[in-house]
Image (cartoon, rainbow, N blue to C red):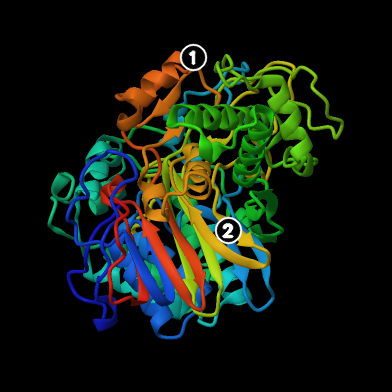
Amino acid sequence: MTRIALTCALGAALALPATAVAAAPARPGPVVPDTGKVPVSRGTGGAVASVDDVATKVGVDVLARGGNAADAAVAVAATLGVTEPYSSGIGGGGFLVYYDAKRQKISTVDGRENAPRSFTPTTFTDGQGDPLDFTTVVNSGLSVGVPGTPALWDTVLRRWGTRSISQALRPAQQVAQRGFVVDQTFHDQTAANATRFARFPATAEVYLPGGQAPAVGSTFRNPDLARAYAEIRRDGVDAVYRGRLGRAIVQTARHPQTADGSSVYPGQITTKDLRAYRAKVLKPTRTTYRGLGVYGMPVPSSGGIAVGEALNLLEAYDRQTGRPLWSVDDVQYLHRFAEATATAFADRGRWVGDVRGVPTKQLLSQGFANERACTLFDPEQAHARPIPFGSPDGSYSCDPAGGTLAAQRDDHGTTHLTVADRWGNVAAYTLTIEQTGGSGITVPGYGLLLNNELTDFNFVPTQPGVPDPNLPGPGKQPRSSISPTIVTDGHRPVLALGSPGGATIITTVAQVLTEHLDRGLPLVDAIAAPRLSSRNAATTEAEPQIFDGATGAGLTALGHDLELNPEIGAATGIRLLGRNRFEAAAETVRRGGGSALVVHPDRRPVASTR
């Protein structure tokens, strides 16, 4: 959700000239609104792209003052915790992919929320084996996982940064204290959650001033959140994992207070769970696509695996049909794309979770993709849903696939940022509190919403007799769809991107990649292009430009059962053009449009391709 300009400027550097103009959407769509934000910029000195203008300008200011991509990524994320509080913040988690230019090495950081040590595979059941009501669990302390965002920030700054956490969080504290101007998205998301926010007094006090959603154009301040940032700046992340702020988080989750005195499920996190939390630096997933390296998040995220498998399948379809993806029409392109992502989701559901022995190497092998394409793909007909999962056993031919699994729930309370600096370091970072507004529970006196990330676990096995890798367990992390991605040409990064949107993150990232790499669209046009999301459910979601047009009719004729989704994802990305040159791109319309800036913009604006 984008928002805006500070009511009090953070400094002259945050009012950088916006000289670039938006490129037109690649296909017919809504006219780009005049929000004052810039969805595409090109220039030198470093680049930042996010859904929020204030946060993007904070990041550009960090780069302009000599900070690197790690410093800017943390500063932008902390600011999004203020201006995008229903999608991110101290009370949540996330995943980051980082390219270290000095070492020419890509690493990832896992800041996903943990389940309490008390969790078991039956925690979300009623004692009779039946699942608890999903919505009831969401709006309770039982959904709250151990926050990982502060630990990720600390890990990133210590490993790659040049600034302290106090320096990195200072702009966010100022934004929280001084306020920002409410835009339509912030108002609408508040209004949509007003009933459940009103149930928790601390949430209502902060996010429903006067008992209603803040008006568009009004100034929204959160001095309680500024206090939380001040404590972290003073005490470091120990304020969360060993200090007073952490104790307040535990107390709030374990004993949620409601306005009418009604009871909700209590949380199970403890101060021991907080003290035990560590953000983990992990090796990325890797696959090749069109000769480029594609790096993403490993388990417990399914993003790197699912995006990589979908890309491998598209290459297999090319060989199977004798026609490359760039040469086919829109209907055939989206048909292939839908079949690839649905197949990847079938395999994700069976094999991927926070368990030992996930066959990542085989799931990302071209041999496995070739077998799946041979068994399942028909260029003239969509395969019946759900598509059966495969057997990534290292022995591939053209054998029938295995069993099927039910479709999984989605989460949507997420945001993404992309940063690159003048030294060539790159950060792609997606952070979340799971559902929009998280659990709906705010920590009194600290103004931060707690996540409901634990509802990303499956409450019961998805298929009797089939092992489920995503059941809850002690200290376990729920499976995620988060897919921050860096693309390289040899050892040099050429593209970084990501998106919010729950399980549609995977399809959004894969579609932006293929629209840009295969279909030849400029990055901003690839981001703006109408989207399709096929996740192995009975229906395939499509945005209006596809659903209502000839492309939708063509897909329906191939057997795709389309379902209208007004908005899928909200991507940002950066192209690295060499010699300290960058092109930053963000949404032109979705979530009110994004904000993409460079430190030193070209004098000539980026030209539209339409």
Spot occupied by residue 407 in the image (x, y as percentages of width and height)? 55, 23
Residue to which mark 1 is pinned = 559
Q: How crowded is mark 1: few (under 14 residues within 10 Å), some or many (20 or more)?
A: some
Q: Which residue is pictured at 67% across the width and 38% down the height?
A: 353
Packing grade of label 2 (10 A; few <14, some 14-19, many >=20) is many
Between 384 and 209, the one nearer to me in the picture? 384
Q: Which residue is depicted at the point 58% across and 51% down?
A: 112
Looking at the image, residue 336 sits to the left or right of residue 346; the answer is left
Q: Mark 2 and mark 1 in contact (Cβ < 8 Å)? A: no
Closest to the observer: 450 or 444? 450
Q: Where is residue 592 in the image (x, y as percent from the top left)?
A: 25, 49
Residue at image position (54%, 68%) is 426
Q: Which residue is drawn at 30% across and 36% down?
A: 196
Give, as a three-letter code, the residue at label 1: Gly
The x, y position of residue 324, in whole percent, is 59, 37
Residue 420: percent from left, percent from top: 49, 70
Side of 346 relative to 252 (left or right): right
Which residue is denoted by mark 2 in the rendering? 486
* Element class at badge 2: strand
Please tell me whether residue 301 is drawn above or below residue 60 in the rendered image: above
Please tell me whether residue 158 is drawn above or below residue 371 in the rendered image: below
Q: Quadrant of residue 494?
A: bottom right
Which is more foreground, mark 1 or mark 2? 1
Q: Is residue 408 left or right of residue 136?
A: right
Q: For marks 1 and 2, give the CA distance.
A: 34 Å
- Closest to the observer: 118 or 12? 12
Q: In the rendered structure, which amino acid carries the disc numbered 2?
A: Ile
Task: Please say if 465 is above or below 113.
Answer: above
